[in-house]
Amino acid sequence: MKPTLQTVADRVGVSRSTVSNAYSRPDQLSPELRERILDAARELGYSGPNPTARSLRSGRAGAIGVLFTTALSIAFTDPYAVQFLRGLAEVAEDNRTGLLLVPLRDDDEGALEAVRNAAVDGFVVYCVPGWYKAMEAAWARGIPVVNSDHFGSLFVGIDEIASTRAAGEHLMRLGHRRVAIVADYISPDRRTGEVSVPSVEDLGSYVSRERLTGYRDAFAAAGLEWSEVITISAAGNSREHGAAAAAYALDRAPRPTAVVATTDLLALGVLDALAARDLRPGRDVSVIGFDDIPDAAQAHMTTVRQPALDRGRIAGRLLLDPPDDPADRRVVLPTELVVRASTGPASTGSV
Amino acid sequence: MKPTLQTVADRVGVSRSTVSNAYSRPDQLSPELRERILDAARELGYSGPNPTARSLRSGRAGAIGVLFTTALSIAFTDPYAVQFLRGLAEVAEDNRTGLLLVPLRDDDEGALEAVRNAAVDGFVVYCVPGWYKAMEAAWARGIPVVNSDHFGSLFVGIDEIASTRAAGEHLMRLGHRRVAIVADYISPDRRTGEVSVPSVEDLGSYVSRERLTGYRDAFAAAGLEWSEVITISAAGNSREHGAAAAAYALDRAPRPTAVVATTDLLALGVLDALAARDLRPGRDVSVIGFDDIPDAAQAHMTTVRQPALDRGRIAGRLLLDPPDDPADRRVVLPTELVVRASTGPASTGSV
DNA sequence: GCCAAGCTCTGTATCGGTTGAGAAGGGTCA
DNA sequence: TGACCCTTCTCAACCGATACAGAGCTTGGC
């Protein structure tokens, strides 16, 4: 039988409360008694109060739930995601809180159960497209949730629309009129290939929806109809998927003069696809990404910089100490268009 | 006030147990009553049994603790680590279990508390060098621990010594006699630079200790004294640190004809350092890594392949269902020396 | 010398469920 | 008709701790 508080209490001849205090509120008892208690505990092999029991009584789980899509590895493969997580972990660490990764299965029922069963003080929704019911379940738990789409929930993010609108305007100023967009999560079956996105508003994924909206608006302002823009679905957010998707843009005639992507990882894949075809970024085809991960700078890629680390940190703070004022519950961080060599004037050359 | 089982029970007019059964043991009550209960729950905004309370009673936390060193981001930056984690997550998912990342602070006391406070069913020790007391605390919890150094604990790994011995023999066969080793966690203050490692056995990090031992043995068998081998500490396991460390080997005279590293990430850094000096891998200087991450193949780098995904999977299985037979509690997976272009005959040229 | 204030420690209620024994009611079978 | 069983639900104990009120004893101020 594992020792409990009571075991130790009996051994020392004090009450259970006193042993509890020895661990949780050292100022509540004399140092000598505390020492005796800790000695007895050591002797009995008692390694401190049971975390679960403590959680139940104190009402604090000591963990933040992080909801993931199925592909955990993909999530960790994205430097942006890792940075976000790191910011989150930093704050969690300072608050003596852990990070509970909740892998969501593909089947809805399993995902719901996972969310309902997670012993956490709050959830961060992370790379989870809106069509998962899991977000709903998280919200139903009645604990703080960062970045759900629910009204009144906590939010930290950027002005996605304005960010890509700026990028789009940059492209329009350069004279591009044949443009392709590579995006993740815009086809429900998650395949790679050209898809028709008649109304951006109906997209399930928040991020893709907003980023596409920004581009659409910028293009519209310059007189480029959305229906003329080629939208290509990538099966996942990775360099390889980006390259595969880019093929659908680059191998058609007339070839687009610009290919933009909703993430840097996808955009790096587009650059790979250019290289494979001996096309020069910024001259033959302009490319824009999103996030500004370290590799983007190395690749001299134009992109939108967003503060990933800060996003994570703020998500953590919002969760662990939700502000009362509704205005403070939504934080919008600034972004910046970083122009590098991968964008240039539209090539007027043939095909 | 949040609704509880009792709230729902009162509403429907049944006992608390019955409501509990409605969620956890549907076969114990009539379908109609169950429906009525679930309806009432929905109406009251009750989202299922409190996970913490359930854990307390049932004795299952529903999470595996993953102990990390401080730099969470570093851990996620290593593709090997990500693969391992992915294997673990896969098994966890199948067992309706989450992954609790426990960030360990630098100060011992904080780390201990984090370990003692984690509501988990077991721990996986992950990139934690031996000098952290946290491992001790995990063991003291009396729950399964994978890969602690304790006798009788669960273990999944590879024969590190034999792996690097094979790599070392490969190097010896090629005639190399001026060799440098780049390793992480071999200097307590974690700085970059040449360090003296008189006795490999005393190294705190299990992994570095074993891998260096394998090389030492292979070198010794070929008549190369350990004291003649240059050992260089890297401040962390990353490409950049690897490159920085490599400088201490490459910029000396006579220059070593081979530089081996304890991880692929470090070895890739060594290759970067070679490139910066216009030295040809495999011709001017031979390089060997460890892990065989995808980038290693792309860089044509000789390395030791270990099954990261399987390691994660098996770690998970050991933890969630520890075998009774002590023999089954230790799993040693096979490795393979993958010879690529980064190793070649020792260059006999001047300096 | 007396009362208030402080310091230590105890007792009891409670956190929100799960569990196994058993009660009530209806049906089957000889 | 009575013995027996099955289904459906209730009861009371328990999981391992924390919170809070208050008891007993020392101190300190006046």
Image (cartoon, coloured by chain):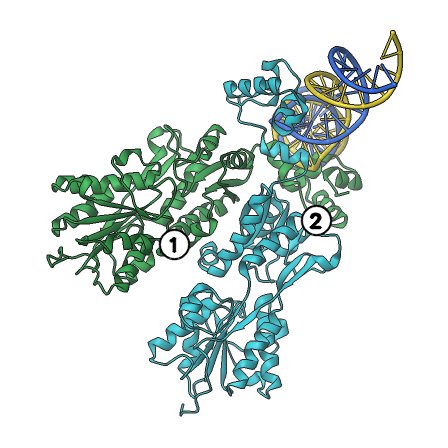
Chain colours: A cyan, B green, C yellow, D blue
Q: Name the quadrant containing residue B165.
A: top left
Q: Residue at x 43, y 68 (%)?
A: A297
- Could you tell me the amino acid type at mark 1? Pro
Query: Where is the C terminus of chain B found, in terms of image quarters?
Result: bottom left
Q: Residue at x 58, y 77 (%)?
A: A166
Q: Is residue A303 left or right of residue D4?
A: left
Label of residue A331 in the image = none
Task: Name the one closer to the observer, A337 or B195.
Answer: B195
Q: Position of residue A19 (x, y in %)?
A: 63, 22
- Could you tell me the amino acid type at mark 2? Gly
Q: Which residue is mark 1?
A: B79
Q: Position of residue B328 (x, y in %)?
A: 35, 33
SS at badge 1: helix
Task: Tell me, yes or no, if residue A67 can be seen here.
Answer: yes
Label of residue A142 in the image = 2
Q: Is residue B110 left or right of residue B139?
A: right
The subunit letter for the residue under badge 2 reads: A
The subunit letter for the residue under badge 1 reads: B
- Give a yes or no on whether discs 2 and 1 share a subunit: no
SS at badge 2: loop
Q: Name the quadrant containing residue A313.
A: bottom right
Q: Residues within 10 Å of mark 2 (few under 14, many from 20)?
A: some
Q: Position of residue A36 (x, y in %)?
A: 57, 17
Q: Nearer the viewer, mark 2 or mark 1?
A: 1
* A16 w.r.t. B103: above or below: above
Q: Name the quadrant containing residue A330.
A: bottom right
